[in-house]
Amino acid sequence: MEAGERDGAERALFGLLEQNPEDARANYLMASLCDQGDQERRAVPFYQRALAGVDDLPAEDAAGAYLGLGSTFRVLGEYGESRRVLLEGLERFPDDRALSTFLALTLYNLGEHREATSTLLKNLVETTGDPGILPYRRALAFYADRLDETFE
């Protein structure tokens, strides 16, 4: 989105939010706009208001709001908040690979390397079409929960 388009979209969204500050979709769109403009800190309250009305959002936007806020907290170094939001999102959307992948990034930042690696391996083996990995899917899935074990 070009700067002029972004400014126009921001003005339109502010107009909607002036009329209805709790509009979950308008808040989500404003948060996304802030994120796209590298204004993560500014995006946070918009994401929070969007999630306050999460039941009014289409599922794709709801998942996007959890992902956006969780990722934003991670970028801002607020790892505990990031984990909380991403886990909440995964409670609603347990099969959302993007949420679990961003959770793995947060877990890494929290020093939970085993859980982060396990999550990434599970996502990889469950979604890959790579011909170099496909023959090893069973082994990788097995090791994903046994990263610290050795076998004789």
Image (tube, rainbow, N blue to C red):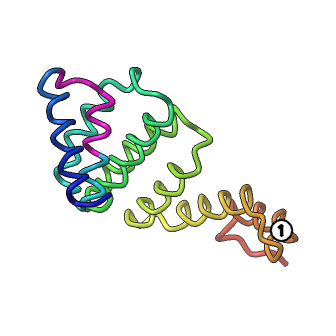
Image-quadrant location for residue 137: bottom right
Residue for point 88% across, 71% down: 135
Percent across and percent down for residue 121 are: 66, 64
Residue position marked by numbered label 1 in the rendering: 134
| Extreme-right residue of the structure | 135
Amino acid at the residue labelled 1: Leu
Between 69 and 139, the one nearer to me in the picture: 69
- Whether residue 21 is in magenta: the answer is yes
**Residue 105 on image: x %, y %:** 45, 63
In the rendered structure, the answer to whether residue 71 lies left or right of residue 49 reads right
Q: Quadrant of the C terminus?
A: bottom right
Q: Is residue 131 magenta?
A: no
Q: Residues within 10 Å of mark 1 (few under 14, many from 20)?
A: some
Q: Is residue 144 left or right of 10 when viewed as pictured? A: right
Name the spot of residue 87 as percent of width and height, x first: 45, 42
Chief secondary structure of the magenta portion? helix
Q: Residue at x 43, y 36 (%)?
A: 61
Q: Residue at x 50, y 59 (%)?
A: 104
Tag 1, which secondary structure?
helix
Vertical position of residue 105 compared to residue 28: above or below: below
Q: Nearer the viewer, residue 47 or 70?
A: 47
Residue at x 44%, y 60% (from the top left corner): 107
Compared with residue 116, is residue 17 higher up or lower down, i.e. above or below?
A: above
- In the image, the segment drawn in magenta is 20-31
73 horizontally vs 45: left or right: right
Q: Nearer the viewer, residue 148 or 131?
A: 131
Pick the residue in front: 149 or 7.
Answer: 7
